[in-house]
Image: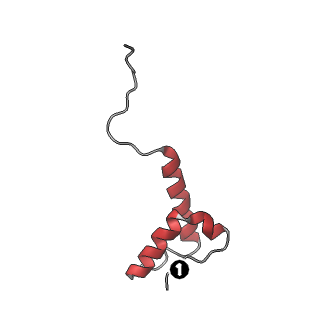
Amino acid sequence: MAVQPYARRGVGVSWIVVIYLVAGGIIAATHNYWSNPNTVKAIVSALLATVAWPLILLGVDLHIT
């Protein structure tokens, strides 16, 4: 039985997921989704824009009214 010298411990997050969310946060911020999160709707819109940022690049408005 071979021993893995660099075994992973615990639950980890893929680097691709981290890069995807960071890019989403930057794009959502540059399109003013994170500019004024005072209400629940604004926060949900900002979170949605962070996760679904490719839609923003296609011109979809993700602001919840």
| Disc 1 secondary structure class | loop
Q: Where in the figure is residue 8, as x and y percent of width and height? A: 37, 32
Would you say 6 lies left or right of 49 here?
left
Along the line of sight, the residue nearer the viewer: 29 or 12: 12
Along the line of sight, the residue nearer the viewer: 3 or 19: 3
Residue drawn at 34 percent across, 42 percent down: 11
Residue 65 vertical placement versus 10 (above, below): below
Q: Which residue sits furthest front?
A: 1
Q: Which residue sits furthest bottom?
A: 65
Q: Tell me where residue 30 sits by quadrant.
A: bottom right
Residue 59 vertical placement versus 25 (above, below): below
Residue drawn at 66 percent across, 73 percent down: 59
Q: Where in the figure is residue 49, as x and y percent of width and height? A: 52, 69
Crowdedness near tag 1: few (<14), some (14–19) or many (≥20) residues, C-alpha within 10 Å: some
Q: Which residue is mark 1?
A: 63
Would you say 23 lies left or right of 57 here?
left
Would you say 54 lies left or right of 8 here?
right
Q: Amino acid at mark 1?
A: His
